[in-house]
Image (cartoon, helix red, strand yellow):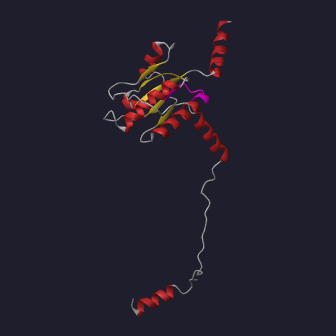
């Protein structure tokens, strides 16, 4: 550094106060305070999650996902397959670990049931190989949906909603929706 540059530097730094020589540690609080009750509820809900992540039979990529609970009419599955039930909510599980998908799917179904939603779209992805991660998640989603008693039926989505990489799900009516439906139709029959 030349004398001229040194002079410019000293002139620019004339009003700067040097830091003290001792080391100080500054502890910052997190940006957002996490609600302890919400965390506790999430933990309790994750403990109640009945979806199993054990042995899995991988569904080949060219086999469409389809399931109908016993007692459900074929017409319900046909309407679901043709996209007549517009999805009221959707869940995207793309590029997520299997355990995270398990937790999110369970929370999503429980939340949909609380909000009296009946028609859902779950985007799980589709891999080129049967052993790809997307196809493993797809196979787990089929297994998990069949384990939930709230699920009446599910099938692959139409190409506009994701095709083989997504599925439509229909949930059973809640008790409140059944009572509302009964009230509406009982008034007509009088």
Which residue in the rendered view is the most extreme toward the bottom? 3
Q: Is residue 60 above or below residue 98?
A: above
Question: Looking at this view, is 12 or 27 the one in front?
Answer: 27
The quadrant holding residue 164 is top left
Can residue 82 be seen in this snapshot?
A: no
Residue 116 highlighted magenta (yes or no): yes
* 115 to the left or right of 102: right
Quarter of the image that includes the C terminus = top right
**Residue at image coords 42%, 89%:** 5
Which percent across, then down, holds residue 167?
A: 43, 28
Which residue in the rendered view is the most extreme toward the top? 190
Q: Is residue 49 above or below residue 10?
A: above
Which percent across, then down, holds residue 110?
A: 58, 31
Which percent across, then down, holds residue 10?
A: 49, 88
* 179 to the left or right of 15: right
Can residue 32 be seen in this snapshot?
A: yes
Residue 164 highlighted magenta (yes or no): no
Question: Looking at this view, is 77 or 185 the one in front?
Answer: 77
**Residue at image coords 34%, 35%:** 131
**Residue at image coords 65%, 22%:** 176
Q: Is residue 12 above or below residue 114?
A: below
* 102 to the left or right of 188: left
The quadrant holding residue 166 is top left
**Residue at image coords 46%, 88%:** 8
Which residue in the rendered view is the most extreme toward the front? 55
Question: Looking at this view, is 16 or 46 the one in front?
Answer: 46
Quarter of the image that includes the N terminus = bottom left
Which percent across, then down, holds residue 132?
A: 35, 37
Residue stretch rendered in magenta on the structure: 112-120
């Amino acid at each position: 550094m030349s004398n001229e540059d040194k002079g410019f530097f000293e002139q620019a730094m004339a009003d700067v106060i040097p830091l003290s020589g001792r080391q100080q540690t500054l502890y910052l609080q997190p940006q957002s305070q996490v609600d302890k009750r919400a965390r506790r509820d999430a933990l309790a809900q994750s403990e109640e999650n009945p979806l199993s992540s054990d042995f899995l039979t991988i569904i080949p990529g060219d086999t469409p996902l389809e399931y109908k609970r016993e007692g459900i009419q074929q017409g319900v599955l046909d309407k679901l397959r043709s996209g007549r039930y517009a999805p009221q909510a959707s869940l995207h599980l793309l590029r997520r670990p299997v355990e995270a998908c398990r937790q999110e799917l369970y929370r999503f179904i429980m939340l949909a049931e609380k909000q009296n939603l009946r028609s859902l779209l779950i985007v799980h992805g589709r891999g080129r190989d049967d052993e790809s991660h997307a196809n493993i998640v797809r196979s787990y989603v089929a297994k998990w949906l069949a384990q939930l008693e709230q699920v009446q039926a599910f099938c692959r989505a139409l190409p506009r909603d994701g095709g083989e990489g997504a599925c439509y799900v229909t949930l059973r009516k809640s008790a409140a929706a059944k009572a509302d439906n009964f009230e509406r139709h009982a008034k007509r029959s009088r």
